[in-house]
Amino acid sequence: MYLLHNIQSSVIESLSELYGQEFTEKDFQINQTKPEFEGDYTVVLFSLLKKTGRAPQALGEELGNHILETKPDLFSKYNIIKGFLNFSVADSYWMNLINDHYEDERFGKQSLNGKKVMVEYSSPNTNKPLHLGHLRNNFLGWSVAEILKANGFTVFKSSIVNDRGMHICKSMIAWEKWGNGETPESSGKKGDHLVGDFYVMFENELRKQAIELKQKEDADDVSHYDEVQQQKLIELQQRRNKLLEEPQTKATAEKIAKLDDDMMETRRGATAIMGEVKQMLLDWEAGKPEVIDLWKMMNSWVYEGMDVTYKLIGSDFDRTYYESNTYLLGKDIIQDGLDRGVFYRKPDNSVWIDLTSDGLDEKLVLRKDGTSVYITQDIGLAKQKYDEYKIDQSIYVIGNEQNYHMKVLKLICQKLGLSYADNIHHLSYGMVELPTGKMKSREGTVVDADDVVAEMEKEAQIKTEELGKVKDFTPEELAGLYHIIGLGALKFFLLRVDPKNTIEFDPSKTIDFVGFTAPFIQFNYARIKSILRKNELQKNIHLPLDFLPLEKELISSIEKYPAIIKQASEELNPSAIAIYIYNIAKTFSSFYTEHSIANAESEEKKQLRLRLAIMTANVIKSGMGLLGIDVPERM
RNA sequence: GGUCCGGUAGCUCAGCUGGAUAGAGCAUCAGCCUUCUAAGCUGAGGGUCAUUGGUUCGAAUCCAAUCCGGAUCACCA
């Protein structure tokens, strides 16, 4: 039981015994005592005054005395300042904590609670390699899964691979046209990068063709458009003309830009090369052998390449779903919902659900030709996950651009009365943006995942060589160290921020290795390990029963680790762990500078500090482990 | 236009289930390596917590309105 909960229940008990009144932990607040006052935990009395009918000073004294009497093992003294009742935790309490847990590497982690959770994350497209945005997703998903495990859940990590559709056909077409039979082996390129290069080639050609259509349009030649396209372009053009007549504000300029985009999108759809893509998609769905073979071959290149990246960054999955297997799922559920009146059919035969009463819009769930849309298979996959694993909670790690989509998915499942609907949870996270704005693979403004990891490792190497502390390392050990530090710095950079916030990444600046960073934490871990190599721990020694302020600060912050894991698990928020671990490393760093462990005032003091150092190292290693960050023995 | 998210130090971010004088890191300035690893430590300066109003003993935190930035509202995925 955490100290905080211990204190809460002590207060509730005492209030009951003193005044015969029942309170809950929500009726009053307990804070960490501010450093400028004496004490460790503070009971804020204001909210208790009315019901108890006591003045702050009187209530504080009565409560303070009573708790001191009934819980002498917990508190040693108290003081009251204004309405704040500050308790000092008994040194014996800290001592017991140290004796009970200094060798406990699982400290803070809970035993199995019998609940099962699936965390879906990563979910890549197979037409291009992973970029920095995917890294945030991967780090978040992996970390959240580990945090849930630490809190007692049985966790299944899953990924849905988007392996079919327009995007991969684009790469396939480009490879057919310009590939000359190129393979990862023949080109020496990583498979996912090779396929991504063809995607970029395709986009370049597509852009070129769309601009050509625009030029023909300007010359009054609209023969390349079918009737629907012509009509759409005319309509967009009319809306554009109308806007031009209005006063030119920022808002109208934006609207015009949007219309320009829409018109260009229509032109792109009308290009010859997009025609080829559409045909290829039809051929794929019809199972045309040469298309299927090409598709399998190019996807296999991507998988090989991505496996290398996943291994590099430490992502793993218990279950991988492929969209080529799931894209037909969900139709039977739609039919069932149609029979039960959850959905309705429009005259053109398409199937919809009306979500306007929930503040959303009408949503299509089946096209007029009976084929499914994205949400259809998501409904199906949600069910499949539940059927396969009987999960109690289903977490989706997906960017905030899909907030609306996920809201709709959950709402539809709820309206269908599916038992698992309420347990669908979207862990929404913000985009990683460049100083110039959003990364766009179409425009080639992406930070490649493999590249950024390599750069971080290079940076770790430069810093390490400058400091020259590990000159005796073998080349393999050095490479391992650079990886631990470089990848650690990157993961920490992306995980220390609240998931929902946007992160700005400036490729022209290197990510810090000093301050609020993984290398700082790793450095303090290495310092502890160095001490532990040089100083022997003696068991069965009597420890001195008093603490210096920094010693107490350390043990007090170690004590909070279990509560932090719980909080991070409830909030699905690795940044809570990151901030906590940084703070404990910082406290240790001050302690380290201020007090010697090896040359402590007495052998007893040295043994106490060794135990504090061990516990700090355990918590750092454990907490960083939950973020997917390794810690080095030396650096 | 509807919905959602954000606006805290020059920059990047904590704090947001209401509590004591709003905290870190970077950057700037001043100190500290013959002593366990200086990727460090100590200190200084730096704030109308977007604005206005409300609720309250007490508001960065809750409520309302406004301003700014972003996302989204596809028979794309």
Image (cartoon, coloured by chain):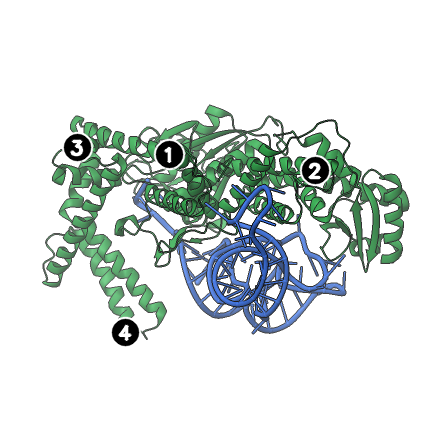
Q: Is residue A8 above or below residue A335?
A: below
Question: Counting other residues with Cα less than 10 Å from the Cα at mark 2, is it few (<14), some (14-19), or many (20 or more)?
Answer: many
Instruction: Inspect the image, locate mark 1, and give the three-letter code of the amino acid beneath it.
Output: Pro
Residue A279 image position (x, y, % from top left): 17, 38
Contact between labelled residues 4 and 3, with CB atoms less than 8 Å apart: no
* Residue indicated by mark 2: A606
* Residue indicated by mark 3: A186
Instruction: Inspect the image, locate mark 2, and give the three-letter code of the amino acid beneath it.
Output: Lys
Which residue corresponds to the image point at 15% horizontal and 50% vertical from the top-left? A226
Cα distance in 3D space between marks 3 and 4: 57 Å
Q: Earlier in the sequence, mark 2 or mark 1?
A: 1
Cα distance in 3D space between marks 2 and 1: 36 Å
Chain painted in blue in the figure: B
The chain holding disc 4 is A
* Colour of chain A in the rendered structure image: green
Q: Earlier in the sequence, mark 4 or mark 2?
A: 4
